[in-house]
């Protein structure tokens, strides 16, 4: 009993220390005035001693997370909690239907697309969101709602650009989850769980990269809410928050500690509502729904989580840590290159507009 209590205490302390910076993990785009015309910092400037230290810390923290997961998964209290959620697994689709319906209604009322900040320029897209809400009312039409969600995301890519919309890639996972909700093929239906894990995890990871490449956006939020830094230097805190977000997204992708993470993240996001208010609720409703689905479904039934490829503890620890470095390198390089390209394209467009204005003024 004493040993079990110690493991619970260690588990709680690790989660608390890991998630302390999560309060700044709102999409900073919602609370500032971002633009691809803002200059991103170069990859060389982004890789600071703090960045390298956080990378190393995350490397070892992920290995310890594997060890921690092995320690708690066979305890009686954890099995009881998991059993309670499994008994209610049948409600996962209903939860997602309600979460997406609330999200789309809030966006429709605010005249935005899917989330705050994506202001509608075409009114018919707002009504398309409303139609998707109606399709969510019945189980038979839920797959159509899933297809409609994928359409709305594609419309966002056309309207705002793929680079911008990758922040909201989670809607692709939500769309697939609902699209496959009523299929009778068990193996195909089971694909919706790993799809949702990957999509939500990728969105968290991508937004974490944003805090590294566009630090001015996050620093602005911290300047407006200095209590979020917990007394740390804002620049240091922002990098720490970015790596927490990177780690959380990555853990969801590889399927490690999925239920504890889902519960902790959704509780903390509810707490941040006290700081950011209504906008936080509008933007995170669909994330809460996804996290509740993770609580109910766990890793899923048929398809093993990536981390479960290895059964031996040393191999699982190496898999989690080494692949994080690979995943980080694979994504941060194109993120930086695309950000630079977007900035250059924006600068060229502004120069052309200015030149055209000067020519018109000369002709007059």
Image (tube, helix red, strand yellow):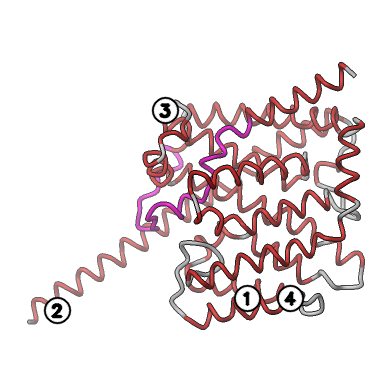
Q: Do the residues labelled 2 and 4 touch (CB within 8 Å)?
A: no
Residue 309: which quarter of the image?
Answer: top right
Q: Residues within 10 Å of mark 3 (few under 14, many from 20)?
A: few
Report the residue marked by disc 4.
137
- Badge nearest the viewer, 4 or 3: 4
- Badge nearest the viewer, 2 or 1: 1
Q: Which of 54 and 101 is in front in this view?
A: 101
Q: Which of marks 4 and 1 is nearer the N terminus?
A: 4
Q: Where is residue 48 in the image (x, y as percent from the top left)?
A: 46, 31
Query: So how many labels did they put on this image?
Result: 4
Q: Earlier in the sequence, mark 1 or mark 3?
A: 1
Please report the residue visible at 62 percent of the width from the left and 34 percent of the height from the top: 19
Question: Is-magenta flag for residue 41?
Answer: yes
Compared to 10, does 27 lie above or below? below
Q: Where is residue 241 in the image (x, y as percent from the top left)?
A: 53, 37
Q: Residues within 10 Å of mark 1 (few under 14, many from 20)?
A: some
Q: Where is residue 41 in the image (x, y as percent from the top left)?
A: 40, 44
Q: Which of marks 3 and 2 is nearer the N terminus?
A: 3
Compared to 20, does 327 lie above or below? below
Please report the residue visible at 56 percent of the width from the left and 55 percent of the height from the top: 281
Label number found at residue 360: 2
Report the residue marked by disc 1.
151
Q: In this view, does 362 lie to the left or right of 230?
A: left
Which residues make up the magenta segment? 18-45
Query: Disc 3 on helix, strand or loop?
Result: loop
Query: Disc 4 on helix, strand or loop?
Result: loop
Gap between marks 4 and 3 measured at Cα: 48 Å
Query: Disc 2 on helix, strand or loop?
Result: helix
Report the residue marked by disc 3.
233
Question: Is-magenta flag for residue 92?
Answer: no
């Amino acid at each position: 009993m004493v040993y079990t209590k110690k493991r619970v205490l260690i588990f709680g302390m690790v989660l608390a220390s890991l998630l302390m910076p999560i309060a700044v993990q709102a999409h900073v785009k919602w609370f500032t005035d971002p633009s691809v015309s803002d200059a991103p910092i170069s990859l060389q400037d982004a890789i600071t001693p703090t960045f390298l230290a956080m990378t190393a810390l995350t490397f070892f923290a992920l290995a310890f997370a594997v060890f921690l997961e092995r320690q708690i998964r066979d305890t009686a209290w954890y099995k009881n909690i998991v059993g309670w959620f499994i008994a209610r697994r049948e409600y996962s689709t209903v939860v997602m239907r309600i979460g997406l319906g609330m999200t789309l209604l809030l966006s429709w009322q605010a005249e935005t697309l899917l989330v705050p900040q994506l202001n509608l320029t075409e009114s018919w897209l707002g009504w398309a969101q409303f139609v998707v809400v109606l399709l969510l009312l019945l189980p038979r039409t839920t797959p159509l709602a899933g297809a409609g969600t994928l359409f709305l995301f594609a419309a966002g890519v056309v309207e705002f650009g793929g680079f911008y919309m990758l922040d909201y890639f989670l809607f692709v996972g939500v769309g697939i989850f609902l699209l496959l909700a009523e299929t009778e093929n068990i193996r195909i239906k089971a694909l919706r769980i790993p799809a949702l894990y990957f999509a939500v995890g990728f969105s968290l990871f991508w937004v974490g990269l944003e805090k590294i490449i566009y630090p001015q956006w996050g620093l602005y939020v911290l300047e407006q809410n200095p209590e979020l830094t917990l007394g740390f230097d804002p620049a240091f805190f922002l990098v720490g928050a970015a790596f927490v977000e990177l780690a959380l997204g990555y853990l969801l992708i590889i399927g490690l500690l999925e239920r504890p993470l889902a519960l902790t993240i959704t509780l903390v996001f509810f707490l941040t509502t006290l700081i950011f208010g209504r906008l936080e609720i509008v933007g995170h409703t669909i994330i809460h729904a996804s996290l509740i689905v993770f609580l109910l479904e766990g890793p899923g039934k048929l398809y093993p989580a990536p981390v479960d490829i290895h059964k031996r503890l040393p191999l699982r620890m190496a898999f989690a840590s080494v692949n994080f470095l690979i995943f980080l390198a694979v994504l941060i390089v194109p993120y930086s290159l695309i950000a630079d390209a977007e900035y250059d394209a924006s600068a060229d467009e502004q120069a052309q507009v200015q030149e055209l204005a000067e020519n018109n003024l000369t002709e007059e």
